Amino acid sequence: MKFPRTRALVAALVPLATVAALAAPTASANTTAAPKPTVTVTPNYGAANGGTAVAKANVPCPEGSTAFRFMIAGPNVSPSPFGTSRFGTALPADGIPDTSVIGERTLFPSSRQPVNGAAYTLDAECMDAASNITKLATTTVKVNEGVWTTLTPVVYALPTKIGALRISLVAFTGFAGGEAVTGALRAADGTTVPVTLQPQGTDAQGRGAALLQVPASVADGSYTLVVTGSASKAVAEIPVTLDTTRVWW
């Protein structure tokens, strides 16, 4: 039996990649609002045990600040300096906290390893001559499968209700550029079943689209589709339903 819609799904993969690109938030060219303070970590993923990076805020410290520091904290990691002295490092001329003036350093202290599956905060702090501290910006660092990452990918499923054909389209964005991705369905009890995503790769901007195929062994019910970057171990999730009483959605 032939399914014309299946061929249509495959043909839709290329435009769906465009959907993934358009779905990512973009700044308006007409806005004059000040940027939201944040911290950029370069590279955006690395080994939890020994991975090095630099961190930079996107806005300068308030007037009167003379030094800065970055502090990371979370489960099993008490607030610890990253790339700077706990007592502050002199601000560069532009006033923007930037650990590249010191060079790459391990993100987590060697004495306190992060917990797999946990999230950590990396704060950029400003200090004045009296050592008063002002938190300037922050970012979240997640740890998964021995890798830390600041990536926050998202995944879209079209449709989210999968019928007897056991296929759907997925689009994803926000992964590391050029990395492969893998998929799995997670049931309410936490058990997971691998699914096929074809093709599996992302483009240079970390975007992609794929045909999702659900194995015949998976029973009807509600699941979470989990898409994971093979290198960054960044994770994106979306609820999906398998209902094989329906041919299509």
Image: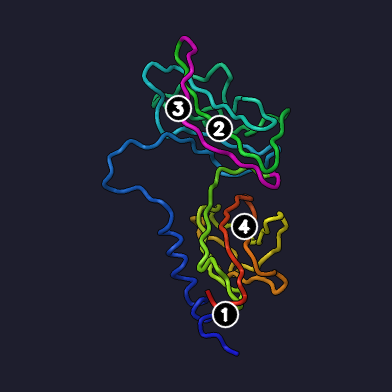
N-terminal of the pair, mark 4 or mark 1, is 4
Describe the element under mark 4 as helix, strand or loop: strand
Pointer 3: what residue?
136
Pointer 1: what residue?
247
**Quarter of the image where one finds residue 85:** top right
State the image coordinates of residue 229 (x, y, percent, origin top left): 61, 55
- Which region is colored magenta? 130-146
State the image coordinates of residue 31 (x, y, percent, origin top left): 28, 43
Q: Residue drawn 51% across and 76% down?
A: 9
Instruction: State which mark lies toward you, 4 or 3.
Output: 4
Pointer 2: what residue?
122
Q: Amino acid at mark 2?
A: Leu
> How much space separates mark 1 and mark 3, taking CA atoms?
53 Å
Pointer 4: what residue?
226
Q: Residues within 10 Å of mark 3 (few under 14, many from 20)?
A: many
Q: Amino acid at mark 3?
A: Leu
N-terminal of the pair, mark 4 or mark 2, is 2
Q: Residue drawn 55% across and 32% down?
A: 122
Name above or below for residue 217 compared with residue 235. below
Q: Amino acid at mark 1?
A: Val
77 is within the stretch colored magenta: no
Colour option used: rainbow
Instruction: State which mark lies toward you, 2 or 1.
Output: 1
